[in-house]
Image (spheres, coloured by chain):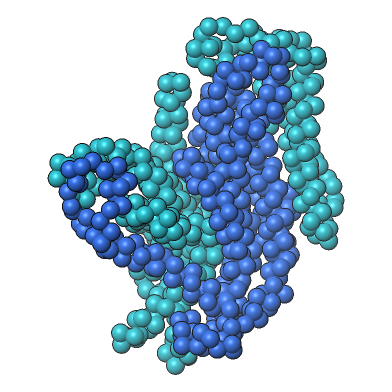
Chain colours: A blue, B cyan
Amino acid sequence: MTAVTEKAPAVALSPKDSRESFKLAKFPVYLAVLLIAVVWLIPALGILVNSFRNPQAIQSAGWWTVVGELFNPETWTLQNYSTVLDQGFANAFANSLAVTIPAVAIPITVAAFAAYAFAWMDFPGRNLMFAAVVGLMVVPLQMALIPISRIYVGLDITGSFPGLWLAHTGFGLPLAVYLLRNYMGSLSSSLIESAQIDGASHFTIFTRLILPLSMPVLAAFATLQFLWVWNDYLIALVFLGVARPDNNVLTVELANLQGQFGEGALNLLPAAAFVSMVLPLVVFFLLQRYFVRGLTAGSVKG
Amino acid sequence: MTATPPVLRDEELETGRPLEEPGSHDNSVQIWLLRLASALIVPAVLVVFFFTFEFLQDPATNKVVQVVVAVIVGVGGVWLLYWALDRLVNVLPERAGVGVRPFVFAGPALMILGFYLVYPTIDTAVTSLRNASGDEFVGLNNYTRIFTESQYLVSLRNSVIWAIVVPIVCVVVGLAVATLADMLPRKTENFFKSLVFLPMAVSFVGAAVVFAFIYSFRVEGFGEQIGLLNAIWTGFGASAVDWMRVAIWNNLFLMVILIWLQTGFAMVILSAAIKGVPDDIVEAARIDGANEWQVFRRITVPTIASTIVVVWTTILITTWKVYDIVAVMTGGEDGTSVVAERMVTEFFTFQNNGVGAALAVVLLIVVMPILVINIKRFREQEALR
């Protein structure tokens, strides 16, 4: 870290210039960053390599031993993936989609209307109610597990997708309302006022003006909520999997497989893990910008 | 019928906030009943539709059909409903309409929040004062058990260790990567940052599986060590270790998984903050002869202190509620139990509602100060607007 100790030249360079000069002096910096990145990558790399190896090879030698036989065609196979997909993971993938898509779409709709009201309408208790929403962001969802699962069991709706959609809606709403309201509230008030003068109703202003302008924050929340629902284990386990195993989502199925570690599941786990990760990784790479924006804006969440 | 355009007042233009519209604070009983009704209709229709239509419940139904119906009803249908209610409000007398309309918009969200978060919180708090089956009031007995019996004390101890170690390591490593990467050319910087950020897309369960292949252990004579850690360990001549069963230290090995997942979050947020440090201050310090470490220590860190606190608390909350990693890796065996994991075990495995609820309340109480600070900060921001 002490590598770049040269004084700035007397001739004023633009800031980024002085940052990017002295290439040689930055060698230790490159080395340090590279080291951390490699350490971060190795765990995932190991499992990626393993997922394409022969089942017997996975069982008998560590993944790093492929280095010697990289170009041996017998090293690589797609067999694990086809086995895993046949053994319930194709079904679980469909279940995860069936849970996630509505569990992202519904809260966004409900939250957008509420956020507009909190930002641009006046009603008794508005600030108090919004403060309550801010507070609810931190409440651990463990608080809801016992009462809600009691109600779900009573109504005999555990194991159903709709129960999960609404639960994810409830748990995602505080952050959604908070993010959207702050964004909508920061839009220019003169814009809305001129629309009002032109006789536009709240509904028209909301659908024609505010929603199109709010696309960045809607995308940010959608990305966050997608990753959160897709990767969720606890809610799916409690409200879905226990009652109806054929509705299991990927995380629950993967955890079950992990439970059989050592009983021959070892060669299936890497491929199974990657099946569960592939969609979030794609979303992550395509929508990273929105994801970062959502994270930055929502970092007050619990 | 279109709403009459409200006449703008000077104050409204200045503050940019809508002022009290006539009728919006009408608190008569009828208005409140209308407000309540309009807030309830959307959630009620969702529930009725989702749970009375057998095909959504039937596992034999094609999942594509279920999803399409859910999205159409959940987005299109709900949208139509908001629109219809908004139209209905137009029929109301002007004063009543202005008072009710906000509840058409905000009400459904508030009702859903009430059902999924507010009511359960109260219910859980009450349940925590009752016995295992919930039919007898036992006062604070469940809490005394949590804070005296060794099985729960282990969970509490571990949760506290997690909450201390994980956020600090994440912030320190995240800050280091963000600072170092900031010195590199933009493209190189973004590449390295993506690598560290990548685990943010991975589920906790997925991460547990990833690390199962690092911590994997085989009794000697039962094949080669396929776990990376044991391969390195035995490479140094030591005998293989079952990392998940080494008391106390196994907790640390589990924490590494969460650190792997969360450091990217710390790095991204802190990196954005570092980019916001004014360049002229940094340049001025360099001209005065400050080296990079001094610039980092005296300028960067103090400038981004508030962001560091936000990142630290966010990771603290995540860590405090960690469940998946422990449940999947060890199931809380060998002294690795944490509060959130113990809570689920008590409730679902032992069917002990009282203790389970009390553990959930413990989870809540610890994050309570953060909740209060968030609300306070929000109110201060509002006062400035």
Residue B365, horizontal then vertical, whole percent: 44, 42
- At horizontal 39% and vertical 64% (from top left) the residue drawn is A37
Question: Hey, which residue is sitting farthest front in the picture?
Answer: A11
Q: Which corner quadrant of the image does residue B229 belong to?
A: bottom left
- At horizontal 44% and vertical 59% (from top left) the residue drawn is B191
Question: Hey, which residue is sitting farthest bottom in the picture?
Answer: B221
The N terminus of chain B lies in quadrant: top right
Residue B24, horizontal then vertical, whole percent: 64, 13
Whether residue A48 is visible: yes
Residue B268, horizontal then vertical, whole percent: 42, 50
In this rendered view, identify the residue nearer to me: B281 or A274: B281
In this rendered view, identify the residue nearer to me: A244 or B273: B273
Q: From this view, report whether residue B77 is shown above or below residue B216.
A: above
In this rendered view, identify the residue nearer to me: A280 or B160: A280
Q: From this view, report whether residue B123 is shown above or below residue A271.
A: above
Q: From this view, report whether residue A9 is shown above or below residue B104.
A: below
B308 horizontally vs B63: left or right: left
- At horizontal 56% and vertical 86% (from top left) the residue drawn is A75
- At horizontal 49% and vertical 12% (from top left) the residue drawn is B14
Residue B231, horizontal then vertical, whole percent: 39, 82
